[in-house]
Amino acid sequence: MPQFPVTGVLLDIEGTTSSISFVYDVMFPYVRRELDAYLESHWDDVDCREACDLIATEGNLNANSLSAQAIGDEVIRLMDDDVKSTGLKQLQGLIWKAGFESGEMQAHLYEDVPPALIRWNADGRDVRIYSSGSVAAQRLFFGHTEYGDLLKHFGGHYDTTTGPKKESESYTKIAEQFAVPASEILFVSDVVAELDAAREADLQTCLCIRPGNQQVAPGHGHAAVSNFAQLEFV
């Protein structure tokens, strides 16, 4: 088992703590299904308009003729193209809020994740999340899991407002907020390009191999695990 001398742990979500299929087969379809109704009923809400204005800015939409229909069309385009849009992530988080809080959705987690979080916290590790999903969506996700509310196990959350996940500067910024040397932080993700960027920022790295994840070619140069129980901290 790989051993890491770390005090901080930074985790990805999709393909690392939760299955990719849950995101694509449950969460994204929920947004598509509820999008029009949500925009119609929440169009004048401050949070909704902020997300929509950001989507419009990112997509160079005409602010003078902005409508729920135009935003809806842009959201579907962004989702179809799997664009990592900050505005899209914010709006998705607002729509997911209703689904999680009503109990219609419960976030999937791999069964090894909750005991690992408990063990790491007990050992004094500072565990945080870095995902392309908005911080608000992350809090909803971990606050409404199959194992209950797990938010107390995390010391912080980061999204694309910190920076892109494939750029080393993003990890440098996050390490500064941990208040420990970057070399004492382990980043765990299923995406090699993200791990490469984190390593450039002097973080330790580990590839997470889960069922359904995209196959990774040999020679990536990162330690790898298929279960959090395989992570050993010293």
Image (cartoon, rainbow, N blue to C red):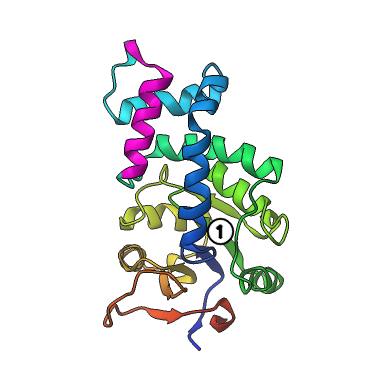
Q: Disc 1 on helix, strand or loop?
A: strand
Return the x and y of residue 105 as percentages of the image width and height.
63, 49
Q: Is residue 92 above or below residue 36?
A: below
Return the x and y of residue 95 as percentages of the image width and height.
55, 36
The stretch in magenta equals: 65-80
Q: Please give left or right for residue 39 compared with residue 194 in the image.
A: right
Total marks placed:
1
Return the x and y of residue 152 as percentages of the image width and height.
70, 56
Is residue 67 rendered magenta in the image? yes
Q: Which residue is drawn at the image coordinates 35% and 45% (left, top)?
A: 84
Q: Is residue 163 above or below residue 225?
A: above
Residue 174 is drawn in which quadrant?
bottom left
Is residue 230 rendered magenta in the image? no
Residue at the bottom extreme?
Answer: 1
Residue 229 is drawn in which quadrant?
bottom right
Return the x and y of residue 26 as percentages of the image width and height.
53, 51
69, 138: nearer the viewer? 69
195, 72: nearer the viewer? 72
| Residue 14 seen in render | no
Check the picture and name the quadrant holding the C terminus.
bottom right
Q: Which residue is drawn at the image coordinates 39% and 25% (left, top)?
A: 71
Q: Amino acid at mark 1?
A: Arg
Residue at the top extreme?
Answer: 64
The residue where tag 1 is placed is 128
